[in-house]
Image (spheres, grey):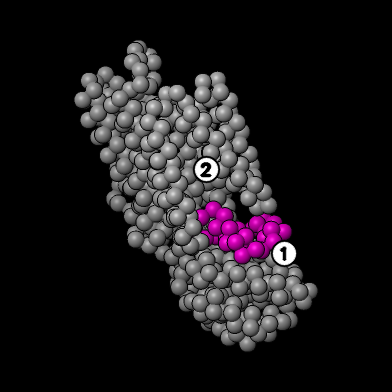
């Protein structure tokens, strides 16, 4: 394949990737968007493999087959509750690839460059490796936090911001001698910078608390895009540049939207822990006092039987219990009796952007009854019954009333304004933010203790 045909193939693949992002922006077109992405990637790989400069075609095909098989097995076996950590570890692969591409490009440049062209290329290598290294180590830490191997509590070292500044300044400063160094010294400087930025990635994500992990996953998605774009510059590959820019910009936009939904500054998420101040974790809002009213399956069934309008608020607890199919069966039974049942989704529910939407789609819940927070929040006062299934911080009224709470100012689903709230929960434990929820003590709240799946099975049996 000559260069002109390769350019046409890359252009077609880029258009398919853009169409894929457009499709993924809406639940009803997400499946089509996925297919656009699959076809675009297949076209990109095929066109690249057919290029005359690709000599070791057998190795390329072998790598694609082996990598594709591993990816297919991982995707098929992963539980929906483990999807966030799978996404995080896949981001790390993109960062590692950028690091390896940068180092190999420096060690074996394709062509000799001189003057300003040489300087620009060296800077591309430097930035590509730096972004890739931060993405790689940060994603590994995020993966470990999400799967429970590391604590979700933010690691707040003394003078952490100064440490970040020193490491960043040193990494940037090393680029000056790198540009004029001989190959052996240049490689040493490049590897030293890789270690420094890798440590920076570890520290940045380790300092972020569990409540911010959905935003962190989105940010790492953005980082992986910029790492891919940097690799594209190093390899003079237009499609890689375009694709990386698409992923990087869309991830950054999603991160901004999620921070707006949490009333958080994106810089505060990147450089600080959730609910922290001057290196200490805030304990505000943690000592709520009051009496809890619990209910059994018969009492909850009675409340459901008399409700004409019901809103279900799903959270990570529903994902852990794998109760989404029973919730859908429960809702179908009620809708068959003329009861209005809808789902309220908070932007940061779960541990991944869109986590609850994916769970409900997997269970076959129709898209038209799945409502975003801004669409449904005003309807709670006119709702007879709200079922909070495994959610906590996203329905915490302290976010509006308790200035000492670390989640104060975060927009939440105002479930307490409904006629009655039933909270499905294993225990009285706090959520990711580490604060108690005053909703549990409201007069119109009933605590339905137990595993969400077992609880839903009991309700479905009663219905």
Task: Point out residue 370 in the picture as x, y percentages from the top left corner.
Answer: 67, 60
Which label belongs to residue 164?
none
Seen as rendered, the residue at the extreme top is 115
Residue at 78% across / 74% down in the picture? 338
Q: CA distance from mark 2 to mark 1?
A: 31 Å
Around disc 2, counting alpha carbons within 10 Å, would you say few (fewer than 14), some (14 to 19), or many (20 or more)?
A: many
Residue tagged 2: 251
Residue at 27% across / 39% down in the picture? 195
Task: Point out residue 335 in the picture as x, y percentages from the top left corner.
Answer: 74, 72
Seen as rendered, the residue at the extreme right is 338
What is the quadrant of the C terminus in the image?
Answer: bottom right
Using the image, determine if residue 181 lies above or below residue 43: above
Q: Which stretch is magenta?
A: 349-376
Q: Is residue 400 magenta?
A: no
Seen as rendered, the residue at the extreme bottom is 298
Around disc 1, counting alpha carbons within 10 Å, would you say few (fewer than 14), some (14 to 19), or many (20 or more)?
A: few
Residue tagged 1: 379
Task: Point out residue 228 in the picture as x, y percentages from the top left corner.
Answer: 45, 35
Query: Mark 1 and mark 2 in contact (Cβ < 8 Å)?
Result: no
> Mark 1 or mark 2, which is nearer the start of the sequence?
2
């Amino acid at each position: 394949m000559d260069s002109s045909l390769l350019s046409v193939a890359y252009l077609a693949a880029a258009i398919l990737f853009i169409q894929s992002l457009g499709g993924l922006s809406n639940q009803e077109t997400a499946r089509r968007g996925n297919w656009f992405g699959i076809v675009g990637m297949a076209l990109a790989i095929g066109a690249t493999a057919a290029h005359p400069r690709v000599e070791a075609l057998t190795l390329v095909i072998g790598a694609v087959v082996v990598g594709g098989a591993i990816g297919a097995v991982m995707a098929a076996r992963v539980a929906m509750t483990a999807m966030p950590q799978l996404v995080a570890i896949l981001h790390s692969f993109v960062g590692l690839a950028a690091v390896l591409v940068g180092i190999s490009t420096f060690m074996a440049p394709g062509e000799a460059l001189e003057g300003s062209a040489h300087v620009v290329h060296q800077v591309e290598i430097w930035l590509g490796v730096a972004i890739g290294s931060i993405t790689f180590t940060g994603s590994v830490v995020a993966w470990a936090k999400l799967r429970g191997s590391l604590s979700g509590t933010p690691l707040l070292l003394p003078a952490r911001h100064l440490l970040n500044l020193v490491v960043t300044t040193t990494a940037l400063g090393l680029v000056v001698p790198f540009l004029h160094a001989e190959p052996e010294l240049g490689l040493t400087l490049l590897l030293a910078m890789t270690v420094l930025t890798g440590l920076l990635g570890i520290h940045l994500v380790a300092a972020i608390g569990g409540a911010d992990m959905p935003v962190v996953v989105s940010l790492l998605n953005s980082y992986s895009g910029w790492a891919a774009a940097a690799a594209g510059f190093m390899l003079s590959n237009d499609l890689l540049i375009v694709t990386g820019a698409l992923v990087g910009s869309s991830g950054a936009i999603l991160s901004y939207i999620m921070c707006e939904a949490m009333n958080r500054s994106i810089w505060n998420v990147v450089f600080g822990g959730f609910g922290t101040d001057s290196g200490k974790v805030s304990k505000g809002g943690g000592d709520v006092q009051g009496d809890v009213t619990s209910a059994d399956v018969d009492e909850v069934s009675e409340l459901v039987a008399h409700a004409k309008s019901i809103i279900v608020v799903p959270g990570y607890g529903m994902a852990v219990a794998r109760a989404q199919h029973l919730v859908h069966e429960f809702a179908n039974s009620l809708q068959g009796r003329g009861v209005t049942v809808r789902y309220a989704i908070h932007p940061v529910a779960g541990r991944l952007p869109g986590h609850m939407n994916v769970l409900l789609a997997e269970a076959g819940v129709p898209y038209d009854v799945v409502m975003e927070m801004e669409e449904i929040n005003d309807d709670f006062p006119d709702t007879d019954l709200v079922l909070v299934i495994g959610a906590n911080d996203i329905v915490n009224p302290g976010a509006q009333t308790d200035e000492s709470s670390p989640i104060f100012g975060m927009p939440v689903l105002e479930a307490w304004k409904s006629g009655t709230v039933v909270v499905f929960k294993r225990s009285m434990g706090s959520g990711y933010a580490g604060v108690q929820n005053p909703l549990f003590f409201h007069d119109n709240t009933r605590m339905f203790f137990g595993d969400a799946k077992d609880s839903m099975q009991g309700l479905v049996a009663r219905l």
